[in-house]
Amino acid sequence: MSLVRPVSARSALLSMLLGAHPPTMSARELVAAVGLVGVAESAARAALSRMVAAGDLDRADGRYTLSPRLLARQRRQDAAVHPETTPWHGEWETVVVTATGRDPADRAALRADLAALRLAELREGVWLRPDNLRRAWPDTVTAATLRLTARPDRDPADLAAALWDLPAWAAHGRALLEAIATAADPATRFAAVAMSVRHLLTDPVLPPALLPAGWPGDALRARYAEYRAWLMATRVGVG
């Protein structure tokens, strides 16, 4: 089975806007952009109408802009492509869930927020990661947790390997790099680059000392930057 599957008109349009700064384009620009990757004009215009109706996009003065919900997704994507790291001195962020009496939906939302912060769950209610990453903490997470800094008494590389499946992430990342390099047509290359950005959303962004040899995170970011630069020549981006 092929690793890369064709993207829908909706996915192509959304990817273009997620990669654009600011995330707004005219219908003409969007139709032309997705046309580069094989999406027909009729399919693109129909998808734009559906996306406005679904609340994915806002439309004003003939321009389409990401909705507030998708602006939050763009911020997560930008942080994945350009993570803000700091020197690591051996400390680990430790987050303990303190809120009680939450319903299943609230618990699931908190878990998703903690994972988006690139924390991993050691046991129920206890999340951690090396203290080498700057990012904004949602108020909902701050209100429901206690944040500490700790230094584990076990080998930190062993702890990282227990918290994240690093070989599997790296193998998939290398497969995506190969798919980008060997894509037979623009649509396949676009899909492979879009998949690589989604994969980067789950990169734990660990300190180099804790990563296995040949970690493909930086290479994936470089391939995305190269591809986005090419698209920027046509005043679009990809995500």
Image (cartoon, rainbow, N blue to C red):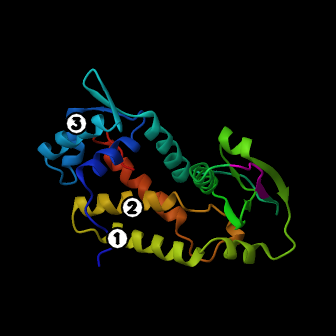
Q: Is residue 95 magenta?
A: yes
Q: Nearer the observer, disc 1 or disc 2?
A: 2
Circle 1: element type? helix
Work out whether mark 1 precedes mark 2 in sequence or the reverse, and give the earlier one. 1
* Residue, disc 1: 179
Q: Which residues are magenta?
A: 93-101
| Residue depth check, mark 3 versus mark 1: number of the one nearer the observer | 3
x 49%, y 49%: residue: 77
> Could you say which is closer to the camera, residue 191 or residue 93?
93
> In the displayed structure, does residue 86 sit left or right of residue 114?
right
| Distance (Cα) linking label 3 and label 1 | 32 Å
Query: Label 2 is placed on what type of residue?
Result: Met
Identified by mark 3, the residue type is Ser
Q: What kind of element bears circle 2?
A: helix
Residue farthest top in this picture: 61
Q: In the rendered image of this protein, does residue 113 appear above or below residue 26?
A: below
Q: Residue 160 location, x and y as percent? A: 70, 71
Amino acid at the residue labelled 1: Ala
Residue holding disc 3: 49
Give percent across and percent down for residue 232: 34, 42
| Residue 19 seen by the camera | no
**Can I make out residue 220 in this image?**
yes
Quarter of image, res 185? bottom left
Seen at 34% across and 73% down, the residue is 3
For label 2, the residue is: 195
Task: Tell me what residue is drawn at x 38 percent, y 73 percent.
Answer: 178
Q: Residue at x 84, y 68 (%)?
A: 152
Element carrying mark 3:
helix
